[in-house]
Each structure stands twice: as structure tokens, then as C-alpha cells.
Amino acid sequence: MAKVGIKDIARIANVSLATVSRTLRTPDLVQEATRQRVLDAVAESGYKPNRMGMNLRTQRTGNIMVIIPDITNPFNADLIRSIEETASNNGYAVLLGDTQSSPEREQQYVDLVEAGQADGMLYFSGRNPFNINPDKPLLEQLPTMVNSNEELDLDGIDKVLLDNAKAASEAVQYLLDLGHTRIAAVTGPMNTKSANGRLQGYRQALQQAGVEIDDKLIIEGDYHIDAGVEATEKLLRLKQRPTAIFCFNDDMAIGAINVLQANDYRIPEDISVIGFDDILYSTYVRPALTTVSQPVQEIGRLCTEKLIARLRGSHDEPTTTYVSHKLVVRDSTGPAPK
Amino acid sequence: MAKVGIKDIARIANVSLATVSRTLRTPDLVQEATRQRVLDAVAESGYKPNRMGMNLRTQRTGNIMVIIPDITNPFNADLIRSIEETASNNGYAVLLGDTQSSPEREQQYVDLVEAGQADGMLYFSGRNPFNINPDKPLLEQLPTMVNSNEELDLDGIDKVLLDNAKAASEAVQYLLDLGHTRIAAVTGPMNTKSANGRLQGYRQALQQAGVEIDDKLIIEGDYHIDAGVEATEKLLRLKQRPTAIFCFNDDMAIGAINVLQANDYRIPEDISVIGFDDILYSTYVRPALTTVSQPVQEIGRLCTEKLIARLRGSHDEPTTTYVSHKLVVRDSTGPAPK
DNA sequence: AAATTGAATGAAAACGATTTCATCTTAAAT
DNA sequence: ATTTAAGATGAAATCGTTTTCATTCAATTT
């Protein structure tokens, strides 16, 4: 079966290429009889317009690139699911750029967007991948994009963000209210805005409560389970152990819980644990995890809708939308031991 | 900044379009001095060859489509991670088709491949999305593809599969060896090959051991946590309760564990639970989950390599590669209660 | 009846690259 | 010294669409 193209349809239906194209794109412009002849030819031959030709002519691919550090993190997986759904409902497909936090990979995928393999991108990283010429207007130098999760240090682009400092400070305040004063923090990578924001919230809450900050209780993690494991092992070795551990994401909290239980600590009687994200598994872990919930589905939808609005030609002023978090109390937190 | 194209480079470097293209694609064909002039122009102007033009001319996009039912399932997320890595190492990008098991969505993404938006696809579904004309050779009617996870009912295409029946039968045999005879099965959707294969293995093992099969102990699930929850609730209501539950994936096993613990059953003393997949979280659940491990990373790599080999022009006979499973015993299984 | 309008269609340009083919130059072989 | 071959380059074709512009024809207006 030689691949059938628009020329073949034109021949079969005895019309010009233009009429075939019009029948498919703007059927109103073609007469009933002709239209029917073309549609018959299309149905009979199983013709599907070739996207490469179409893309080139229309200067759009229908793809949006999603650049994200780690798809195996359930928070990110949920995010992509939501993006994919919104994109698909609007006729876009998702090009996946799982970068494993590698700057080279980020660059590679951004290059792809700039080369026109996708019409725009959702950028979930804080690293600036652009060579910007300060003499020219910024916006003309950037691909159509929306930034989220990790804030990018650029003004004038659309963003969807969470107030990390506030969220973290509420989590810590909740622990303080339970009587905890030795509260450990297992952070994300300290070269990310999210980790810095959350740490700042942690510090603020403690200072406001007049609790001295002990740097030994702050351990840098990387948002993977193992980091939670290692950090907790380290914390348990301290002479003055914490009575609560605030992990900057749920995966690390799950790692922490595991180590604690392996060493016969009761949660929350001996040590409280609190996470961040509210992934599905945090409900199914024992004890169920108290955590700061992010509206992941909403984030995905908002990002995608913002991007698509731009792609459809909106020239509104770029905005930053803040989504709201919520502390979800489950069974991993309780009053501080006496 | 008007977008710079190959014509601009040609003008700046004072050469023809052809020479610019050659400098970038086949530098050996152009003289040192000219090449340098072109490269300078490219560097200076920040020129990136436009992929739409390139794709049309070369008749390839560099994309591979991954059609998969549910990216939020960690097994699938790991799979995609592995695919993405292999693809990226070979210069391909991944177009993500998360179908949420909807046939319409599957069709939509397959159509996209057939329209040339991707060069080939990895198809993780058992539903045949093709209109096949039995008079014509099969292979000419299919896009370049590899099938895995859920076997497709088509001969003559590349596949990567697991022996589900054997794997399940080993899991059940292990439970039988522990003295269990009332062994429940929480299956996947019974319109999938994977669930049928595993159920067949379950039946075989029981029959071989002379244990009568009780249909009340077989409950259809859908591979989501909730299905494990509901199935287990149902099983616990039975007058003759099972002493072991074999869930056809880990997510459902996690749901099962949760219900059991909520109702004060000890695992494994009162009831054993066994899963399938060996996702990361199965290690971090309490008790850690005994499960049938699939080499997810290997599956992803194999699928992608097979596909890319085809895309590079291999005309070897299509093959089915079987990957091997492994029973991983952890803490959720033990001897049957007296 | 002539002029004007509008609808339907086709011819050809355009999108931005790669690649074939022809041309020209220079070096090697006779 | 002539032929041959090889190397470097450019002109133009090509990939498969969409869309502009021109043309035709019938219907409407004057």
C-alpha cells in the first residue's frame, strides 16, 4: 500500500489539492456535492493528512513540551497526568522531557522547543536555560512558556506557584502547637527555590515562637526516599534527638518513617513526622502521613490552560497565579513527648 | 529579533543554502574555510535549524509515541523513565500518550502516529487499534511499533513480554508451600491479557496441588489501590475467609494491607498478602510487601531499543522477547494460620 | 442587457529544511 | 599535454500540506 496523500485524494475525487484541504479544514467553503465526493475518497482510501507537511505549513506542531525533573516522583506523575488531560482536551499532545535534574538534559529539551519541535513548554525547573541578550526585549527571546514548581528568575513570564514559605511555616507552627521544639527539617536540594522557600518558612515559624534554631537539625535532602532514610539515620544519632521531623516532601517522609520504625520508635508517640505534597501513598503508609497538600491537579490544569491561551494568541500581561496549600492532619503527628 | 533561518545564514556566510545544510549535517563535505565561515554565522546569529522543515524533508520527526494506560501507576512511571532515557540517548524524544485505558484516547494517539507526528510507537495495550485489510500484507498496514505489557493479538510484530502465567503460578506455589489453601486472587481487568495470564497461572498452581478453586475468592480489580481496598473488604465478609491474598499488582496489595490493618488483622500472622510488579513503595510499606518482581527498567530499554533498531531500517524477522520475573519475599507473607 | 457581486474552484506560492544533479575547479593519471 | 577523477559548491527539486490569489460561472442588481 503506497502511502496515500492529498494528491491521491484530489485525483480520485477529481478536484484540486486546495479543495481537498478545504473540505477537511473549512468544509463550509466547499459545495455539498464536491465535499461529499472528497469525503468518500478520504473514507475509502483511509487518508490521514500528513502532520509534517501540515506542521510546516501552519507553523505549529500541536505539541507542548513538559520539562520536569523526575517523572517517577508521584507528585510529578500526577502533575503530568493532569497536564496531559488538559492538553489532550485542547488538541495538544505532550512531549515529555524528564531531565533527571540534569542541566544538559534541560538544555537539550529547551533547544528542541526553540527549534520548533513543540509550540511551547511547561518548565518545572528553576534553572535559566536561555542566553538572553539584555539589549533586546526579553519576551521576544523566549519561547512561549509557563513556569511552575521551581520559580525561574525571570520577570514577565507566566507562572503558577505555591507560597512555599507560608506553607512550611504553617506546618512548623502546627508542630509547635503540639509542643514540639526540637523540630528537624529534611530539605530539598538547596539550589532550588522550593527548598529555600520552605526552609525560610521553617526558620520564620521557629524564630517567631522564640525557639532557637539548631543547624544540626537541618539536613539537606534531594526529594528521594533514600535521602529521607539517610537524613533520619543521621538525626537519630544526635545526642539531642528531634521530637519531630519535617520532610520537605512525602517521599522523604516515607523514608523517615521507615527508619524510625526499623529502630523501634513509635510514630507519633516518640517522634512526629510531617511531609509535603500529599501524594496518594501518603494515605496508605502506616501511620498515615500528616502533610502539606498541594493541589497538584489544579496546578497542572492551570499551567496548561495558561500556555494554551498564549498559543492561541493571547497578549495579556503575563501573570503569576498562586495556588493554595492545605495542611492535612493524619496519624503521623502528635503531641511532643514529655 | 526576526527568526533567523537557513537563508540568513547563507547570506551572512556568503554561500548557498546547500552549503549551510552540509556544514551542519555532513561537515566532511565542505572545505575547512567555508565551514568555518558558516559555523561563525551560525554561532553569531544563534541559528537553530527549524525542525518542521527538517522533519518534512527527511520524513522523520525524531519522536516516538508511548501509549500507556496510566502514568500515575509507579510501574508505568518507572517504565517511561527507562524509555525516555534510552530514547534520549539515541536522539529521540518521547511523545506521551496516557490513555487512562480509554479506547478513544488510544485511537487518537495511534492516529497521530499514523499521521506521521511520531516515527513509531511503543504500545502498552492489548486492544487492536488498527483497521486491517486481510487481503494486504499485515506489516505494510502497521506503523513501526513494539508491543509490550499487554500482548496484542497480532503476529509478526516485535514484542517484549513476561510469562504472566508462570509468574503467578510461582507466587501461588510459594503460598501453597507455606500451607495456605484458601488463597484469594484480586485480578486486573479481565479484558486484559495480563490478568487472564496471571489468573490462569493461579488456577494451574491450585489445580496441580489438588486444591479446589473457589470462585468467591476471585475478585476482579483494575490495578488501582481502591480496587484492592474494595476487594479485600469483600473477602473479609466471607464466612470462609482466605488466609492469603494474591493481588495482581502492588498498588492493589497496598490497598489490601491497609484494609486488613484497619480491621486488626496481623500481616502475615493472620493473613498473607502478595503483590506483583515490585514498585519502589512496596519496600516502604509496612509490612514490606512480598511480590513478583518485573524487570521494569529492562523492559523499557528493550522496547525502546527494538523500536529504534526498526526505525534505523532493520528488517530482521520480528521477535518476541521474554523477560524474566523473580519472586521477592519480604514481610507480608508467612505460614498459614492453624 | 450590462454591470456587479458572490460562491466555488484551481493554479501556484509558501512553509524551511535536505538532497540530487549539474557545474566548476584542481589534482592525479596517462 | 591531455584526459580523468575527485572535491567543492550552487541551483533547483523535493517533502505534503495550507492559503493566497486569480478565474469562472451563476445570480443579483442596476
Image (cartoon, coloured by chain):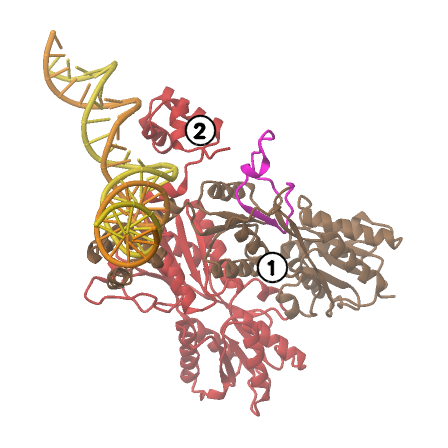
Chain colours: A brown, B red, C yellow, D orange
Report which quarter residue B137 is drawn in: bottom left
Report which quarter residue B269 is drawn in: bottom right
- Is residue B145 visible in the rendered image? The answer is no
Q: Is residue A131 above or below residue B297?
A: above
Q: Residues within 10 Å of mark 1 (few under 14, many from 20)?
A: many
Tag 2, which chain?
B
B159 relative position to A14: left or right: right
Q: Position of residue A88 (x, y in %)?
A: 47, 60
Residues in magenta? A127-155
Q: Nearer the viewer, residue B228 or B92?
A: B92
| CA gap, disc 1 and disc 2 | 40 Å
Tag 1, which chain?
A
B286 relative position to B309: left or right: right
Q: Position of residue A99 (x, y in %)?
A: 53, 48
Q: Which residue is mark 1?
A: A75
Q: Position of residue C19 (x, y in %)?
A: 27, 36
Amino acid type shown at disc 1: Phe
Q: Which residue is mark 2?
A: B42
Q: Is residue B173 above or below residue A11?
A: below
Report which quarter residue A13 is drawn in: bottom left
- SS of the residue under disc 1: helix
